[in-house]
Amino acid sequence: MRKLFDAALVCLALFFVHGAIAADKQLRIGTLAPKNSLYHRQLMELGEVWRTAQGGNAKYLVYPDGSQGGEAELARRMRIGQLQGALLSVVGLREIEPSIAALQNMPLLFKSWEEVDYVREKMRPAIEKKFLDKGFIVLAWGDAGWVRFFSKESAVRPNDFKKMKFFAWGSEVEQQEIMKSLGYTPVPLETNDILPAIQTGMINVVPSTPYFALASQIYSSAPHMLEINWAPIVGALVVTRKAWDEMSPAVQEAMRAAGEKAGVQIRSKARQEVTEAVEAMKLRGLVVNRPTPEQMREWNDLAEKLYPRIRGTLVPAETFDEVFAHLKVYRAGKAK
């Protein structure tokens, strides 16, 4: 009887421990997006959907401002279970699946957001399947505007930037090698290091979206912006498959719907904020440099030189070719 009683106590204890864990589900999301930004707000709204659908004492935590590290670090933290999800740009997403780089690392290729949307949607099912195979679920697709060049001194031609030191993502070694081979000087850093680096002269040019340049105050130390749409910043919210599989079908359905809605909101508002951010910075002293047609030809020539170097290094060759094929079809249709 004593043994039976002890066994019953153990079973009861296990029951209560299991119940406490089940009732105390946590979803921890990391991002470099600033607190209270559009991206942070959308993540919080998504969290409310998850909490309501999950019920119990479910806890949803968002770590903004890169407080959990750079994008490569966020990907690592998801793999070891410290985070269950992250809102990442291609810089972090390619740590999981390299083919995603095709949507961001193709300078001057996309001429409009319509082209970006068309190619993304054509490639989306295959890319999401690749993420699933790597253990991640893509919940929302977003973007953050076009990359522009913010510099301490005025610069309008490609050669003007060869005397400058560029911020470069620390994890993108291949990109740094390509830049060096063309005569540019990349300085590998993390996002949180950009402002002090440009203030101290460690770097003097930052490729950045206008919204991020405004939010981080980069423009105050680099008050010259070259107005070219170098490349779109594309991103996605991903959660680990482990966290996803622990959700009930009803919770998964609610999260899918909320993710689609969040993606639409992020893309729509982020694109609008590009113009608004530039206007706000101009009121505070930003100088906008617009290249002439001749100068723009020099930039396009540079991009053409970059493509063979990007294919098979920054972007897998098969995916690189697929993007060009989709754009050819889209532009042919628009020309009719």
Image (tube, helix red, strand yellow):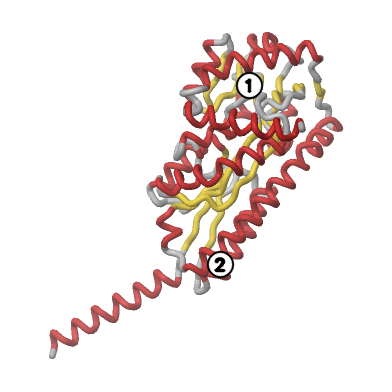
Quarter in which the N terminus is drawn? bottom left
Residue 220 spot, x, y in % from top left:
75, 28
Q: Eyeballing the image, is 162 above or below 311?
A: above
> Would you name the residue on which mark 1 appears?
200
Residue, x 67% and y 30% (percent of image)? 110
Q: CA distance from mark 1 to mark 2?
A: 44 Å
Task: Name the amino acid, label 2.
Answer: Arg
Can residue 213 be seen here? The reply is: no
Which residue is more in the foreground, 118 or 236? 118
Query: Farthest front residue?
Result: 336
Residue, x 53% and y 27% (percent of image)? 321
Query: Farthest bottom residue?
Result: 1
- The picture quadrant where one finds residue 206 is top right
Which residue is more in the foreground, 90 or 77? 90
Query: Farthest right residue?
Result: 283
Mark 1: few, some, or many residues within 10 Å (few <14, many ≥20)? few
Residue 245 spot, x, y in % from top left:
42, 61
Determine whether label 1 and label 2 are within 8 Å by CB: no
Circle 2: element type? helix
Residue 201 spot, x, y in % from top left:
63, 18
- The picture quadrant where one finds residue 45 is bottom right
Q: Which mark is residue 51?
A: 2
Task: Name the amino acid, label 1.
Answer: Thr
Can residue 66 be seen here? The reply is: yes
Quarter in which the C terminus is drawn? top right
